Image (cartoon, rainbow, N blue to C red):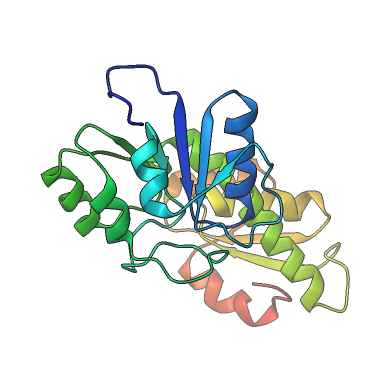
Amino acid sequence: MTENNSDPIKSVAVLGGDMRFGYLANLFAKDGFETYAAALDDCPVLDESVQKTGVSEAVENAGLVILPLPSGKNSPLLAAPLAASPLPLAEVFTSARAGQIILGGQLGEKLIAAASLRKILLVDYLKREEMCILNAIPTCEGALEIALGKTEHTLFGSRCLVAGYGRLGRLLASMLRDLGARVAVFARRLPDFAWIKANRLQPLDKAGLEEKIGKMDII
């Protein structure tokens, strides 16, 4: 079975990734899509409604293919920690057809070029701002978990330095502040300094960083 790209998408293939992608496959199946999962051999959360197949079969049968994060930026292999064996990304694109939609995150330049030659519609979901913002939340929560596990005192009252004030830095600094930490933020741009002050954090420029960095409990 294949789907024409002008028809509504009825089937989805979720390839590789960690348990989050298992939950993603379950959500598609729950919403009525014919759902295939490949390179998720050891994923314990997949529902019975999700069809576990090989990569080629999943791609050939799906109208939409979803790749894990990252997708070919630094490795020719599919990011698939739950797969039984390593899988080259080339297998995905060998099975793909012209006009097929493939979503991935942090797409490599070679992958983009190869997809263009095959007339495959390759979309980087990490270029969506709302996706990046929401993806920052579990990343920051993971950083907090590590900080809690590696220190012998509470985050409350700790002297914390956040280097940078992009999406991750902004969210992490606010989380640390809300936990009662004394948070300083290193930045370079004047608008960032203004936002850091507005969010009741201590801004540090290069000179301030050199002065304060040795006094921090957590960086």
Q: Is residue 115 visible?
A: yes
- Expressed as whole percent of the image width and height from the top left, the position of residue 116 reads 15, 43
Q: Is 164 or 20 nearer to us in this picture?
A: 20
- Screen quadrant of the C terminus: bottom right
Outermost residue on the top side: it is 7
Up-down relation of residue 162 to residue 209 (above or below): above
Residue at figure coordinates x 53%, y 27% from the top left: 33
- Screen quadrant of the N terminus: top left
Outermost residue on the left side: it is 117
Q: Is 54 or 166 nearer to us in this picture?
A: 54
| Left or right of 203 on screen, residue 73 | left
Residue at figure coordinates x 34%, y 65% from the top left: 88
- Expressed as whole percent of the image width and height from the top left, the position of residue 128 reads 42, 36
Tell me the quarter of the picture where residue 99 sits: top left
Q: Is 109 or 81 nearer to us in this picture?
A: 81
Q: Is 149 or 29 nearer to us in this picture?
A: 29
| Left or right of 184 on screen, residue 99 | left
- Expressed as whole percent of the image width and height from the top left, the position of residue 137 reads 64, 47
Outermost residue on the bottom side: it is 214
